[in-house]
Image (cartoon, rainbow, N blue to C red):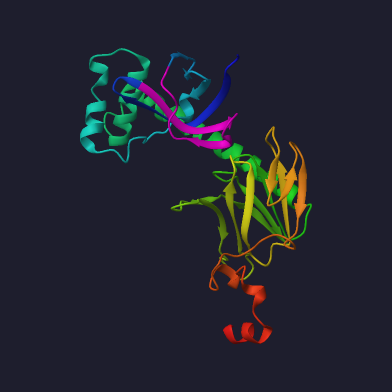
């Protein structure tokens, strides 16, 4: 069976007990979806390094890692003693893997930056950062163009339901994009899209859901009142669900708040919404305002 080929950016090379692993953001992972964070791959099977690109092959996947897209401070959260230890790996190994790890450690520490390989990394990653920004800008513009076809809407291309996908919005003359936040819960994680008003002319929005099933179901629990339409495109090769409604691969569907659950079992949740809200008499609602 042919292995999936996945392009990586913001990638980090790690080593533990002389086994090499990779982490970073996968542009299009066949299982995880688009722009998904890979915490740790399985162990390295074989590798190559040609024209400033590391090819990192595991049991099931071939990862393409351009040097220009590597993380330049990958070990920032590691203890100094561990980082110092990594800087010495090239003393016993001439492998390009260890050369990259040593450079990554020194970049994290901010030392030996005039080294030829280090200087080369800094130069190509500077260009790579500009490339990634241009790619992101083009993708934002493309999504906003689609969102503008619908009034008072948010637009999501569902690919990575468990981690959240970028959202584009269109309200009146205002449009833009919002990145998701993952709220890690004790029993259930949730995906939050929150934008706060920065000025009188600006717009705010709040949209939240629980990822259910095996990353194939969006179960909403909060829409801010200004969201009149939720436009979902399924970019995976299998069916997904928005609440109880199925969306086929490649299909785009429009949903309105009517008939879709909002609110948690709490009278003081965001926007004053609760699944208990509709059972209270009107006069009690007025007293609570």
Q: Nearer the viewer, residue 84 or 114?
A: 84
- Residue 165 part of the magenta segment: no
Task: Look at the image and give the residue range highlighted in magenta.
Answer: 20-44
Question: Residue placed farthest to the front in the image?
Answer: 279
Q: Which residue is at the far right?
A: 149
Place of residue 98 in the rendered image (x, y in percent of width and height, measured from the top left) = 32, 19
On the image, the x and y values in percent for residue 117 come to 36, 21
In the drawing, does residue 74 fall left or right of residue 61?
Answer: left
Picture layout, residue 180 above or below residue 48: below
Image quadrant in which you'd find residue 152: bottom right
Q: Position of residue 163 (x, y in %)?
A: 54, 44
Direction from residue 260 to residue 132 in the image, left or right: left
What residue is shown at x 31% (from left), y 41% (from top)? 77
Q: Going 43% across and 15% down the picture, which residue do you hit? A: 45
Q: Is residue 249 left or right of residue 187?
A: right
Q: Residue at x 72, y 43 (%)?
A: 233
User: x, y (%) of residue 61?
Assistant: 53, 21
Q: Residue at x 71, y 38 (%)?
A: 239
Decide if residue 145 is in sight here.
no
The quarter of the picture where the N terminus appears is top right
Q: How many numbered dots are placed on residues in this image?
A: 0
């Amino acid at each position: 069976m042919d292995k999936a080929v996945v392009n990586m950016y913001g990638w980090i090379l790690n080593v533990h007990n002389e086994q090499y692993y990779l982490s970073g953001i996968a542009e299009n992972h066949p299982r995880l979806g688009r722009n998904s964070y890979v915490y740790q791959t399985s162990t390295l099977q074989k590798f190559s390094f040609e024209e400033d690109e590391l090819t990192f092959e595991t049991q099931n996947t071939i990862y393409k890692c351009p040097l220009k897209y590597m993380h330049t401070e990958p070990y920032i959260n590691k203890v100094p003693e561990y980082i110092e230890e990594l800087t010495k790996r090239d003393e016993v190994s001439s492998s390009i893997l260890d050369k990259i790890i040593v450079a990554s450690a020194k970049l994290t520490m901010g030392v030996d930056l005039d080294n030829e390989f280090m200087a080369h990394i800094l130069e190509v990653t500077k260009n790579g950062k500009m490339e990634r920004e241009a790619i992101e800008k083009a993708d934002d513009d493309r999504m906003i163009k689609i969102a503008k076809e619908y009034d008072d809407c948010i637009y999501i291309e569902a690919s990575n339901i468990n981690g959240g996908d970028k959202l584009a919005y269109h309200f009146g003359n205002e449009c833009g994009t919002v990145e998701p936040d993952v709220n890690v819960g004790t029993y259930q994680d949730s995906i939050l899209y929150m934008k706060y008003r920065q000025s009188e002319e600006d717009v705010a929005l709040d949209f939240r859901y629980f990822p259910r099933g095996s990353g194939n179901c969006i179960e909403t629990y909060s829409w801010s009142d200004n969201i009149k339409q939720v436009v979902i495109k399924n970019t995976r090769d299998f069916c997904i669900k928005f609440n109880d409604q199925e969306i086929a691969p490649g299909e785009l569907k429009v949903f309105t708040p009517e008939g879709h659950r909002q609110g948690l079992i709490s009278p003081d949740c965001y926007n004053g919404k609760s699944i208990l809200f509709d059972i209270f008499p009107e006069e009690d609602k007025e007293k609570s305002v």
